Amino acid sequence: MGTRRKSRELALQMLFQADMGKQDAEQVRQTFWAEHGTASPDVRGFADDLFRVATDRSGEIDGLIERHAEHWRMERMAAVDRNLLRAAVAELMAYPETPRAVVINEALEIARKFSTPESVHFVNGVLDSVGKELEKPA
């Protein structure tokens, strides 16, 4: 597994912990890295970036996801899917140089590992739609 994939998985885990534990971002980071302190600086740096963008811009990110996940409110989505979408949308926003197809494919691989087969289709549809909107000229 590549460093970026590992970072994406760790960012997902931090977002999941923040979401389910209702903890603030800094508290999550401290407890998470105390338990997962073996990550290389590159892996940890990218995971922290994704987590920071996802938490700092959570209102904007959640709004985008809800707008493109027709008939789904954030609280009704499976927690893994909701947080995977948050991490991937954060990456689409913060790293526009990474091709949309790469971000989506990585999210789908992570969904296959941590979620359900139905989730893979859901995540793909939402991220493709969000990605198209983000690529439109302002």
Image (cartoon, rainbow, N blue to C red):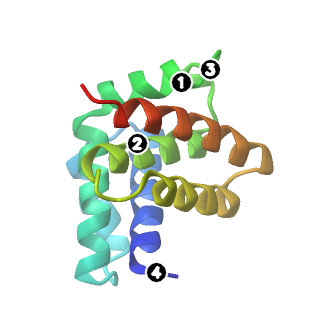
Q: Which mark is residue 68?
A: 1
Query: What amino acid is at disc 2?
Result: Val
The label on residue 89 is 2
Quadrant housing residue 36: bottom left
Label 4 and label 2: CA atoms lie apart by: 20 Å
Dot 4 and dot 1 residues touching (CB under 8 Å): no
Q: Residue at x 41, y 29 (%)?
A: 133
The label on residue 2 is: 4
Q: Residue furthest top?
A: 71
**Of marks 4 and 2, which one's residue comes earlier in the chain?**
4
Disc nearest the viewer among 2 and 3? 2
Q: Judging from the image, what secondary structure is the residue with disc 1 in?
A: helix
| Badge 4 element | loop
Mark found first going from the N terminus, 2 or 3: 3
Mark 4, Cα crowd under 10 Å, few <14 / some 14-19 / many 20+, is: few
| Dot 1 amino acid type | His
> What is the three-letter code of the residue carrying label 4?
Gly
Q: CA distance from mark 3 to mark 1?
A: 9 Å
Mark closer to the chain start, 4 or 1: 4
Q: CA distance from mark 2 to mark 1?
A: 12 Å
Q: Which is nearer the eye, 109 or 99?
A: 99
User: Which residue: 25% across, 45% down?
Assistant: 53
Residue bearing mark 3? 72
Question: Is residue 89 found left or right of 29 in the rendered image?
Answer: right
